Image (tube, grey):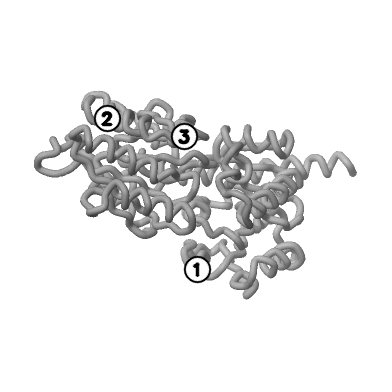
Amino acid sequence: MNNCMTSKLGINASRARSGGAIAHLVGILQEVNPFDFGINGIHVWSYRKLLAALPERPWLVKHTSSAFDGSLLRQLWWERFSLPGELQSSGCSILLNVDAGSICRFRPAVTMSRDMLSYEPGEIGRYGLNRMRLRLIALRYVQNASLRAADGVIFLTRYASNVIQQSCGELRHVAYVPHGVGAQFQSTEHSLMWPSGKERPIRCLYISNALPYKHQWHVVEAITQLRERGFVLQLDLVGGGEGEAQVRLERQIKESDPGGEFVAQHEFLPQHALPDFLSRADLFIFASSCENMPNTLVEAMATGIAIACSNRGPMPEVLQDGGVYFDPENPDSIAAAIMDLIINPDKRMQLAIRAKYLSKQYSWARCAHETFSFIAETAERLNKFADTQQ
């Protein structure tokens, strides 16, 4: 962007409802100094609850609309036909869409990709023939159009970039900017000295809502297998759930632990409450088969806890050599990974230390710098191109 700092950035967060999207926007706006990137003002459009979570800064202007509390059709109508005019009247010269589901065609624009479910081979089939499956298929077409229309695209992982570009086609201007992790997770410590099982059980933790691709029921089966072999374990599932996945999970819990002795499911918790659960756990399990970037995995890494992790998607890219991997759809594989950590204390400690070290690359300061650098670079490239056409 130009050096006289007359540029203003608009941010479309009108439908940013997921925990990851909210944490991302809060994180980068807390860390950025927009003047470093030639931006003298940032305007954010979102619903009231998210706007209230954003920091108060003299350069930050918050906008909302009654459309954000209405139906999805009303939200889309506002995004398509009202947002461009509001961006222009606010003097915004470039737009950041915080997800690829946007149908706003204001230019120039940088669009973030944060959804994988509609792209991952085999995952849509888990939903059967219902409205959710049709919604995911439609969403893929919307996202592909949004990514192709953008002047720059931000992916959270290289894995996501490779899979999504197989569907939308090769994108010319791409950046890879992973999310950060909050300081409250980095400051959480683990002794890594596990109990023998006599004074208390080994506490296993899985943080995620129950969905078809999260496989909590397979984790319950794996813990049951290990208990039958004499390992004293308990499992906390945090995140709640609903629909068929929740029904399947409840069925498995009833079969494996009818007396409620070692499996407990907890409702969704706000992010600030998660470090307490992580601090009291001995082992973290992440059994998802579909992620764009696994935020809860990175948060667990930052605490220095031992991790048994799914070998699917971007998980090996993120965790690298900081954990033990398993097939999330195979309870035997999950059980083997957990047992490996139990019976090998030196390996467990080395992996946990490695995971914590790897997590240090995921900071909101880095995320903010790389995000706004790419936005500024995109604007500068387009300005130079426009100059050559005159």
Residue 130, picture quadrant: bottom right
Residue highlighted by disc 2: 339
Residue 116 drawn at (x, y percent): 58, 43
Q: Please state if 157 lies on the left or on the right of 198 as rendered.
A: right
Pointers 3 and 1 in contact (CB under 8 A)? no
For marks 2 and 1 on the same chain, the one whose residue lies earlier in the sequence: 1
Q: Secondary structure at mark 3?
A: helix
Q: How many other residues sit within 10 Å of disc 1, few (<14), some (14-19) or many (≥20)?
A: few
Q: CA distance from mark 3 to mark 1?
A: 31 Å
Res 148 seen here: yes
Residue 72 drawn at (x, y percent): 65, 66
Residue highlighted by disc 1: 49
Q: Residue furthest front?
A: 255
Q: Amino acid at mark 2?
A: Met
Q: Amino acid at mark 3?
A: Met
Which of pointers 2 and 3 indicates the residue nearer the eye?
2
Q: Is residue 227 above or below residue 90?
A: above
Q: Is residue 171 above or below residue 42?
A: above
Q: Secondary structure at mark 2?
A: helix
Residue at 44% over, 42% down: 363
Q: CA distance from mark 2 to mark 3?
A: 20 Å
Residue at 32% over, 40% down: 284
Q: Is residue 83 above or below residue 111?
A: below
Res 87 seen here: no
Residue highlighted by disc 3: 315
